[in-house]
Amino acid sequence: MTSAGHPDPHVTVRIVTTGGTIDKFYSARGEMEIDEPAVVELLAIGNNAVDVVVESVVAKDSLDFDDADRARILEAVRTAPERCILITHGTDTLTETGALLDAADLGGRTVVLTGAMQPAAMKESDAAFNLGAGLMAAQLAPAGVWIAMNGRVLPARDAIKDRSVGRFVLNPEH
Amino acid sequence: MTSAGHPDPHVTVRIVTTGGTIDKFYSARGEMEIDEPAVVELLAIGNNAVDVVVESVVAKDSLDFDDADRARILEAVRTAPERCILITHGTDTLTETGALLDAADLGGRTVVLTGAMQPAAMKESDAAFNLGAGLMAAQLAPAGVWIAMNGRVLPARDAIKDRSVGRFVLNPEH
Amino acid sequence: MTSAGHPDPHVTVRIVTTGGTIDKFYSARGEMEIDEPAVVELLAIGNNAVDVVVESVVAKDSLDFDDADRARILEAVRTAPERCILITHGTDTLTETGALLDAADLGGRTVVLTGAMQPAAMKESDAAFNLGAGLMAAQLAPAGVWIAMNGRVLPARDAIKDRSVGRFVLNPEH
Amino acid sequence: MTSAGHPDPHVTVRIVTTGGTIDKFYSARGEMEIDEPAVVELLAIGNNAVDVVVESVVAKDSLDFDDADRARILEAVRTAPERCILITHGTDTLTETGALLDAADLGGRTVVLTGAMQPAAMKESDAAFNLGAGLMAAQLAPAGVWIAMNGRVLPARDAIKDRSVGRFVLNPEH
């Protein structure tokens, strides 16, 4: 937001892609594998007009992330020229990356993590809905680290994935 | 946002549907006709967890709106118990409805207008992306009337539809 | 079929496109308009390996066909080097074109007419199913003029469109 | 076909489902798993009017088939009251099941095997195209065992899967 608290129509958002379900396709080997970042086509279909820079930092199932992968994501955020960052990420360890970012000095940036429970390549996927919500949250949420899933935006430090319903919710123990 | 400037995870958003391209289907008569509000299925596919109340106020192509239709939309907003309102609307006269709402006393509500250039029933539609963005803007944007399209949120009073590119932009004359 | 009554794996099928619902897209003007032949993308998604020649002869809603349009379709069939012909066609006057072809000397060709009740551009369309069925019928049905719709292949001279159910059926008066 | 060599509009086709890629969905566990037979929804979207009986005999990736699974498929074909049979099957061992059926006495039935390289649940899938082609082949091909894939119908005994292109072709060694 601008100093007046209003959204800035001239913002540039950096989209950091890391793989995850959103980027999976069905390969000739009969397995779901990570493909090129789905956001490029999703933004085109969404008729997006926000200036974005898409940067692919990792391309893995987030269950396979190691410390070096998370360090690369943190580095991409800290060195970004932009103040608004959207990260697409596998949902299984999304809160772990969120916690790492939340503990770091991000220079007053707004960082939003999003992803999908169904690959963008499926007929019925939450990818486009989440991307729209995440891109908007990256522009409007206050500085800090957020998770935009299921139409909501939650502080990363307070969110957990409730596997029984496949949704992100506030941690009831906080 | 809460008084602290942070999003409220317990908000209820009223979604006022009015027809428009987003709700069009291909009828047996070979015409695009307004169907049931597309938001219900889009929210389900999007795995939405925000509490919403969906209210169908009009079901028309927005080129066919008359003053009574717009009065009904205004009334729906002014009498809503919710502070956050999302309106789905045809794009052709979306800014006219926006101007009417902007001139009214909306009791400090955040009102976001959105829609789609391609019906939600098409294989490639901006509907889900816009709905995600609009629902997030309804939760995060300051009080006022906004247009959420193309990944951006613009003040309704400053936005026009640029028909040459099929996008909403800031009015260059403002 | 070959002389032995078995399908010929080396056949070439000519696909004559004429517009119709199958080729409609939602235009910036908010209308369904005839676009490029949908069969090209449908065949690619279907992973088609049949040698095909796609020839666009007309590009209209079949309700707008005049005698000259039908004459062009007949001419395309009669001058085709191939023995197997598939025609994509609007469903509203598909049986009229079928009758015209059926009354002509087609040189022992197998001619199959197909189309779609929902444009190929819709999320839920019968286009791919009909194209698969029509392409197979063009290879396997005996010489004559056929309508392949709804999973069935009917002699063109005996078929009518039952508008009450949106399907092609045998004419009960025959 | 009827005795006159013409397709019978009153035929009933038995569809034997066995799992395979066509029936896979993306599960909450992040894996592609076999779901309910996709043919039911595909036939509905295809506006199918052929009388069909859908029988689920196995529900596995065809790489996991054992002899008992194939025996069940053979038994389903041999005891079917119908003369026209369509089998949906994983593509990896589709020719093995084809060979087993081809060596058996099937009582003059026409048996067509089909499947998909991409699950029916994907945005871009060959499932509907193959199903239309397979259903038509089941009605029109002579008695015997056939593979309907890629728009073609090949004798099961002469077909192999060319994994380099993901298509079924005539065995060059025959």
Image (cartoon, coloured by chain):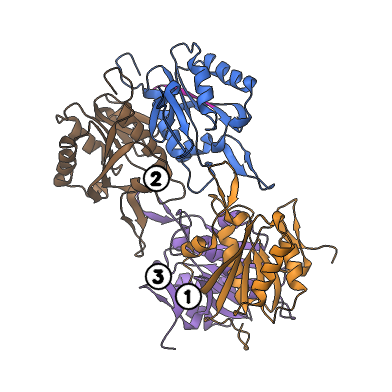
Chain colours: A purple, B orange, C blue, D brown
Q: Residue D44 carries which label?
A: 2
How far apart marks 1 and 2 lie (CA) works out to: 43 Å
State left or right for residue B20 relative to residue A146. Answer: right
Query: What residue span does the magenta drawing correspond to?
Result: C10-16
The residue sitting at 36% across, 55% down in the picture is D25
Q: What residue type is labelled 2?
A: Ala
Q: Which of marks 1 and 3 is in front?
A: 3
Vertical comparison of A76 with D63: above or below: below
- Residue B66 position, x and y percent, is 73, 59
- Mark 3: few, some, or many residues within 10 Å (few <14, many ≥20)? few
How far apart marks 1 and 3 lie (CA) works out to: 18 Å
Quarter-wise, where is residue B131 in the image? bottom right
Which quarter of the rendering shows the N terminus of chain A? Answer: bottom right
How far apart marks 2 and 3 lie (CA) works out to: 29 Å
Residue A5 seen anywhere in this rendered image of the structure: yes
Q: Does the magenta stretch include residue C55?
A: no
Vertical comparison of C35 with A128: above or below: above
Element at label 2: helix
Q: What residue type is labelled 1?
A: Thr
Q: Main secondary structure of the magenta part?
A: strand
In the picture of the structure, the residue carrying the numbered disc 3 is: A166
Q: Are marks 1 and 2 in contact (CB under 8 Å)?
A: no
